[in-house]
Image: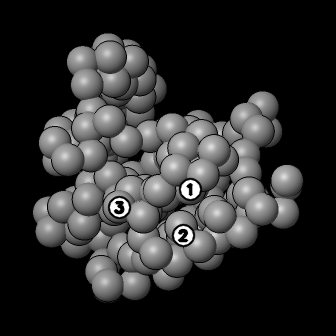
Amino acid sequence: MTRAVCPGSYDPATNGHLDIIGRAAKLFDEVVIAVMINKNKKTLFSVEERTEMLREVTAQWPNVRVDAWHGLLVDYCRENDIQAIVKGLRAVSDYDYELQMAQMNHQLTGVETLFMPTNPIYSFLASSLVKDVATYGGDVSSLLPPSIKDRLLARLAERR
């Protein structure tokens, strides 16, 4: 069985994330979405909320599962017999950063990283940008699954 992991903070998951996950699901027997826990990063949603939202919006792919992880991604790969990391790339700046990570991960454990170019309609899309736009009342309907958009707007309303 071939397994891949799509790691990220997913705070929140966007249509760009789902595009990469869906495309990876066509290539691998199993795709794990690893919601990475970074105690130094201030997130809008808890890990439990992010994993719950991802389970809901990825239910259409039976070979996709969602998990959370705190620590080195390569350790997660080793513990779960995962052969590949799938990363979406929006721009050259993403590549510069992700290439270093891929080389380090390969050096540590031999796990391969596959870079998948983002669909051009999502090339500008980042969770932080979506949160900023929504904070100031901008329409994010085309950027997020409807259920995530509703939760984002509700969370932002709670904080006002």
Kind of residue indicated by mark 1: Pro
**Which x, y percent locates residue 11?**
60, 51
**What residue is rendered at 41% in x and 23% in y?**
101
Mark sitting on residue 142: 3
Tell me if residue 98 can be seen.
Answer: yes
Q: Which is nearer the N-term, disc 1 or disc 3? A: 1
**116 horizontally vs 71: left or right:** left
Q: Residue at x 54, y 69 (%)?
A: 148
Label 3: few (<14), some or many (≥20) within 10 Å? few
Give above or below for 20 relative to 115. Answer: below
Q: Label 2 sits on what residue type?
A: Ile
Count residues near mark 1 (Cα–Cα under 10 Å), then give few for <14, some for 14-19, many for 20+: many
Q: Earlier in the sequence, mark 2 or mark 3?
A: 3
Q: Quadrant of the N terminus?
A: bottom left
Q: Nearer the viewer, residue 34 or 149?
A: 149
Q: Residue at x 71, y 69 (%)?
A: 154
